[in-house]
Amino acid sequence: MKSAGRNKKGRRAKPAESKRRKMPVYSGKIIITSGGLGFVTVDGEESEIFIPPQYTGRAMDGDMVEVEILDETRPSSKGPAGKVKKIIERTRKAVVGELLAGRKIRPLNRRLPDVDVSGSLGEARKGEWVELELAQPGKGSSSPRGTLKGVLGKAGGVAADIDAVIREYGLVEPYTDDQNKRASTIIPDEFTRTDLTGLFSITIDPFDAKDFDDAISISPDADGGDNGIVELGVHIADVSAYVMPGSELDLEARRRGFTAYIPGNTLPMLPASLTENASLMVGRDTPAHSVLFKVDSKSGKVISTKRSFSTVRIAARLTFDEVQSAIDGSPPPQWAPELAKAVDKLVALTRKMRKYRAKTEHFLELATREIRVVCDDKTKEIKGIVQKTQTEADQLVEECMLAANVAVACELDRRRIPGLYRVHPEPSPEKLQDLTVFLEQTFGISPGDLSSRIACNHFLSGLPDDQNKPVILDAFLRAMMRAYYLERPQLHFGLGKGLYSHFTSPIRRYPDTVVHQQLRLADKGEKPIAQDKIANFAKNCSEQELNIDSAYYAANDRLKLHYVKDKMLNSSASVMEGNIRKVTSSGLNVDIHDLGISGFVPLEDIPGSYRKRSGKFIAKKGHATYKCGDFIYLQLDRIDMIRGMAIFRPVS
């Protein structure tokens, strides 16, 4: 550096103060990841503002904040970096967490930092779930603070953990006996209906389904005869006959938004008594909302559609397992010949439809897998962990429901009826670049340009079927955007559709109920709900869906830890296979694929001495390494219920 000069009097001159450029300031909602990274979405701006962990200040996930852009460079494709300058509004009013020593709570939601407890602890004791009412941030406060609002129970018990999740995510309480009783007396609205009771209609659902809101029919001459045209029917429970727009029940369903399938505690969108009356049950005439398709049985192309309010009669209730057995060549022996023939025809037709859709729309062909805890709603006993992968039976039903959702979206748009649309944006260039860097550095894979579905499918189909595949698929899914609801049609990237709505599950999704209501009002010649209200519904439903999904994953992950602790902790033979997902300075984040859980291997428990370099552990002596994507044998060491984490140690 150059030394400072001297002035005429011989005194050392003060170095000129560098004038810091005044950087732009924006306001928006901050999302903070479990790793502490912040992202602020600003209305009207394409890219998010990245907030490094040291610059999130006292902001909590979901706060409205004022952000100053940092005067430092980032790769141009990654957008700007910023610093939280001010918390405009703490949108979260309360938080649920486990009371720790030192008058702190560890929030159940891993996106949130520890919170200090102000005032009296009352009868609350260390190790209990408590709810705090958060204070607005004050000057000089280094961490969030709150006052005790209530004690929920001992943390670490299944029932108390489920209750804590429900309270933390603000899920709506179950319907009361009185509400259920009043709902059971609702008489369906009289309306001109098409009699479709003569069609051979079936329902296909999980074995433990409690509501039945969709059915399928196919014409007896499903080969199409000389012209090759087949009639396919999709019949949906007519919830709009029971739930009138603006009624007390409609407002209650809107408040819930969706049925919340929390393990050990299902919270329905509609009262159970109404669900039972509206469900498409075997052997009874039921109000429905049907879409009939003319389909070319040779190509699988939908030629025409016709929608009507109808009356249907279900001939048989089937399960996915039964249908899959039939597809595999072993139909259940109790099936009548007519039923077996109808299923065979449906399988053949939907295969053609799916093939045609793949050729013309290039939807993302991504096999999904769900691992969930089975927990008894009454006893709160954990029965086990089940894996659900998509089968052809699932695809059969999916194909029919997709066709109905598209047909309804097209009609809403054509008739200019304000409607709710399901949209899925294209992946952002920033996320795709992050994915590319991760794949190149970790696996030496260059995926190329993944901005199109064709390129994505080419990449996915070429993945080797080895231990790295789950890690790569998980990274790919994280690079995709989340689908949401909108009052106007836009692209659904994953499906390759420009017009798509939700119509087929009105018993458990409020957006579907709204679509049914809008079509009913339009068909009756009445004025549909206005566009501005529909826009508000879309925003609220998108937020509710995200919140309920977050609650489900929080409960599912928590109960998986209970299952692992009870079944495997004391079993010396329980060696598990894992994949390293991330290498940190303190250890390895690992995924246990067969259980669908994440865990941690502390560095001090790894035999030998290692240093971290280029995102991996390298042995100081020898050639051993641990890097992301590596396959590793593990044994459960302990369950840290406070951190919500399974701790493992490597085994030879």
Image (spheres, rainbow, N blue to C red):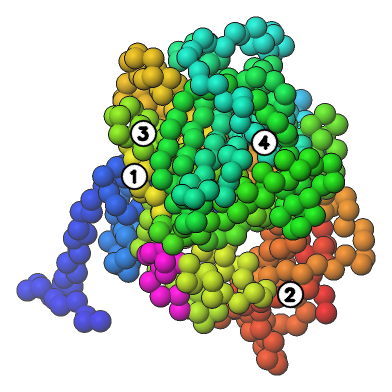
Distance (Cα) linking label 1 and label 2 = 43 Å
Of badges 4 and 1, the one in the foreground is 4
The amino acid on which the numbered mark 4 sits, given as a three-letter code, is Thr
Q: Quadrant of the C terminus?
A: bottom right
Which part of the image, by quadrant, shows the N terminus?
Answer: bottom left
Q: Disc 4 versus disc 3: distance between alpha carbons? A: 25 Å
Q: Which residue is mark 2?
A: 632
List x then y, in percent, for residue 339.
Answer: 72, 41
Q: Which residues are magenta?
A: 446-456
Q: Amino acid at mark 2?
A: Ile
Which residue is tagged 4?
203
The first of marks 1 and 2 along the sequence is: 1
Say which residue label 1 marks. Answer: 490
Q: Nearer the viewer, mark 2 or mark 3?
A: 3
**What is the spatial separation of the Cα atoms under label 2 and label 3, in whole angstroms?**
53 Å
User: Which residue lies under the disc numbered 3?
Assistant: 411
Q: Residues within 10 Å of mark 2 (few under 14, many from 20)?
A: some
CB contact under 8 Å: marks 1 and 2: no
The verdict on residue 25 being magenta is: no
Dot 2 or dot 4, earlier in sequence: 4
Q: Determine whether the residue tagged by mark 3 lies in a helix, strand or loop.
A: helix
Q: Earlier in the sequence, mark 2 or mark 3?
A: 3
